[in-house]
């Protein structure tokens, strides 16, 4: 049985979604080390496809696009940088352990924004009935639609 694990990398806790046959089986938020232990316990490496959201595909904020005040913009840039580094490290470790990792460009658009920010809409869209947060929902969207 093939399962897909979607990961929304984050510096503190990454969102994790396990799907099978386009159905969400489990959502989780895990720290760096716990993420690898969780994936190792998920099953045979050959039966797992990992879809990792690629924060490196996010373009930096420059010029007119950077409408926030400087201090806010700098904080956003630092946070994105942390996510980029974490995503890169997750990819390196998983590939070194023999997992197939597919990098997924961050999803965009109104449906993605609404599903990430609104749990009721996310549940309606995906059929998930449990609790979730933005990171878990983002990981699920990566697993299902990335």
Image (cartoon, helix red, strand yellow):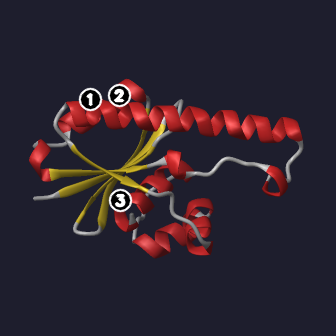
Nearest to viewer (mark 3 / mark 1): 3
Q: Nearer the viewer, residue 56 or 47?
A: 56
Q: Which residue is mark 1?
A: 37
Marks 2 and 3, the one that precedes in the sequence? 2
State whether residue 49 appears in this view: yes
Kindly state the secondary structure of the residue where label 2 is placed: helix
Kindly state the secondary structure of the residue where label 1 is placed: helix
Mark 1 residue crowding within 10 angstroms, few (<14) / some (14–19) / many (20+): few
In the image, residue 94 lies at what x, y percent? 26, 35
Tell me whether circle 1 and circle 2 mark residues in contact (CB < 8 Å): yes
- From mark 3 to mark 1, how far is it between C-alphas? 19 Å
Q: Is residue 10 left or right of residue 30?
A: right
Q: Nearer the viewer, residue 56 or 106?
A: 56
Q: Which residue is mark 3?
A: 143
Task: Kindly identify which numbered label has been placed on residue 135.
Answer: none
Q: Which residue is mark 2?
A: 34
Query: Where is 120 relative to 8, above or below?
Result: below
State whether residue 133 appears in this view: no
Kindly state the secondary structure of the residue where label 3 is placed: helix
- From mark 1 to mark 2, how far is it between C-alphas? 5 Å
Residue extending farthest front? 63
- From mark 2 to mark 3, how far is it between C-alphas? 19 Å
Mark 2 residue crowding within 10 angstroms, few (<14) / some (14–19) / many (20+): few
At 57% from the left and 32% from the top, the residue drawn is 82
């Amino acid at each position: 049985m093939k399962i897909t694990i979607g990961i929304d990398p984050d510096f503190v806790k990454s969102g994790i979604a396990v799907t099978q046959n386009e159905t969400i089986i489990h959502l989780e938020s895990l720290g760096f080390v716990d993420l690898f232990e969780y994936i190792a316990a998920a099953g045979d490496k050959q039966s797992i496809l990992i879809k990792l959201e690629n924060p490196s595909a996010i373009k930096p904020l420059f010029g007119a696009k950077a409408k926030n005040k400087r201090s806010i913009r700098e904080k956003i840039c630092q946070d994105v940088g942390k996510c980029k580094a974490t995503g890169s490290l997750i990819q390196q470790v998983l590939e070194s352990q023999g997992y197939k990792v597919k990098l997924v460009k961050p999803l965009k658009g109104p449906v993605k924004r609404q599903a990430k920010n609104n749990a009721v809409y996310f549940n309606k869209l995906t059929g998930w009935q449990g609790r979730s947060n933005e990171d878990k929902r983002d990981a699920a969207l990566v697993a299902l639609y990335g």
